[in-house]
Amino acid sequence: PARRRVSLLGATGSIGQSTLRVIAAHPDKLELVSIAAHSNWEKLAAIAAEFRVPRVAIHDATAFESARASGAFPPGTELLPGPGGLVELARSPEAGTVLVAVVGTAGLRPALAAIESGKTLALASKEILVLAGSFVMDAARRHGARLLPVDSEHNAVFQCLEGRPASDVARVILTASGGAFRDWPADALARATPADALRHPNWAMGPKITVDSATLANKGLELIEAQILFGLSPGQCRAVLHPQSIVHALVEFTDGSMLAQLCPPSMTFPIQHALLHPVRAPGPESALNLEKLLSLEFRPVDETRYPMLALARQAMRAGGTAPAIYNAANEVAVAAFLEEKLPFTAIPSVVEKTLQALPATVPQALDEVLAIDADARRVAAGALP
Ligand code: NDP
Ligand code: MG
């Protein structure tokens, strides 16, 4: 059988690196045909050489010029500049599967281009669904494109559902590790530094999502993502604390049975599931060993400790553009925290102020959502100290 040809957008990041491990483990099944990143062209050049990738897109204009002048890419590599370069890779026929792992919402246009070209979209960037979920899902339906979730919880739900309809589902329960501060006393959080927040107990991930894990905004975004991907109501999407990060999600069916998906806390498992779907094969990492001591705990999430989760739920219930506003304000607040311009405990108040300032509307067109996203970023920036 022919190898699956994969385009990897966000190749230099944490998901990108795990994806390269999966591709390297399956030289007979997977072929990397194009890669993209924001500005890290040195790493792109190394990937292009190792995986013999013919086409490379670089979002940042200065980085693109440096890359072109460097001579670091293998001879014959085609370099494409700017946002248009990513869209071109997502659309062009050499790839059948596009994996979008660009942090934030910069991957939206490429994701839509992949869908409109009828490709399989393996989606890691949850922010895209929170920003423009209804447009992405509608486009996938219209163009008959497959959308496979890479986010571990959603990939777990997808595996538990195996194509069963939403009408069989009572609720979907996503697990949360509790992030870097789960064992910190609440009154110490105001002094938490970016370095503290970036020390995640179970997962090695990019900086933005690691901070989101510490506030539980990540789980909030994921509840919204689950609602959109699986056609659920807000009340059907739940979160539970599970410190071991072994069970990634559970599906409770209407008859009271629950199915759960378990694997070690490493993204190579969901990434491989999405890239090889529906094929199963040994991957780069081995399964859990149940002969070693393994205990699994579950406990309710204390939303007073995690206001970002309560705000996400509020945005999910308000619907329309509220999730997009939540997401945009969170991105601004997290960036400010990482630059040490905002205390950790002030992240929720920036998001809350932005949600209060901008009433939720039901967008009729994608441009409207993008305008709201820009407004929310402006309002959130104005709410910074
Ligand atoms: P990283 O910060 O590690 O990597 C981000 C990647 O996106 C880099 O390749 C970066 O390129 C690229 N990028 C950033 N902006 C642009 C842009 N404008 N155009 C093109 N490329 C861009 O993030 P993660 O890998 O942790 O996360 C990626 C996405 O996956 C996020 O949406 C996250 O929520 C989601 N996700 C991540 C998980 C994880 O385990 N890490 C788990 C589940 C979901 P450069 O290096 O040049 O800056
Ligand atoms: Mg996740």
Image (cartoon, grey):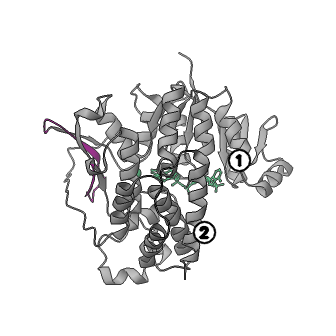
Residue 176 appears in which quarter of the rendering? bottom left
Residue drawn 58% across and 40% down?
A: 111
Q: Earlier in the sequence, mark 1 or mark 2?
A: 1
Please report the bounds of the magenta region as a residue range: 237-256
Per the image, the residue denoted by label 1 is 83
| For residue 325, side relative to residue 6 (left or right) | left
Q: Which amino acid, mark 1?
A: Pro
Residue mark closest to the camera, 1 vs 2: 2
Which label belongs to residue 378? 2
The correct choice, above or below, for 311 with respect to 147 in the image is below
Judge by depth and name the residue closer to the eye, 378 or 357.
Answer: 357
* Residue 171: assigned label: none
Residue 57's x, y, as percent? 72, 44
Between 93 and 23, the one nearer to me in the picture: 93
Q: Where is residue 47 shown, x and y percent of the image?
A: 66, 43
Q: Residues within 10 Å of mark 2 (few under 14, many from 20)?
A: some
Amino acid at the residue labelled 2: Arg
Taking the image as shown, residue 33 lies to the left or right of residue 212, namely: right
